[in-house]
Amino acid sequence: MKKSASTTPAQGLVHSSRLIIQLSNALQPGASVVVSPQLTPPRNELETLHQLARMGNMRDIAQCAGRVAELDTRCGPFADQLHLLAKGYQFKAILTFVERYLETRRGA
């Protein structure tokens, strides 16, 4: 979520909290994640993210999330979730998140 002049810190916190709850639910073992192909970053970006997550490189993950959002604005929700996880140093959650998207891309 990008801050605008009309977004208060409290609204940003509420939005971030909702994303964390959604991600926590989605990343539970056995949970299904609905991945929309038009919102999926390019495969090479997913593979880069996967490698960075395996290394636990949060700074580069956050940079890659920004690059994904710039490549295609439709990937904004993906990038926002990834950025939030990186900010919280949730490397295992990032790994699971990216792997689910990679699996979807393989099936496409």
Image (tube, helix red, strand yellow):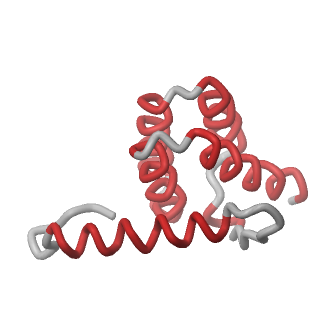
Closest to the observer, 31 or 67: 31
- At x 44% / y 58%, what residue is drawn? 80
In this view, 50 is above or below 102: above
- At x 70% / y 35%, what residue is drawn? 47
Left/right placement of residue 62 relative to residue 9 reads right
How many labels sit on residues? 0
What is the x, y in percent for residue 60?
Answer: 46, 29
Left/right placement of residue 73 relative to residue 47 reads left
Left/right placement of residue 22 relative to residue 1 reads right
Examine the image and state in which quarter residue 46 appears: top right
Closest to the observer, 96 or 28: 28
Query: Residue most toward the top?
Result: 55
Closest to the observer, 80 or 15: 15
What is the x, y in percent for residue 90?
Answer: 53, 44
Query: Residue most toward the right?
Result: 107
User: Looking at the figure, which quarter contains the N terminus?
Assistant: bottom left
What is the x, y in percent for residue 103?
Answer: 83, 52
What is the x, y in percent for residue 19?
Answer: 46, 68
User: Looking at the figure, which quarter contains the C terminus?
Assistant: bottom right
- At x 71% / y 65%, what residue is drawn? 37
- At x 68% / y 61%, what residue is drawn? 27
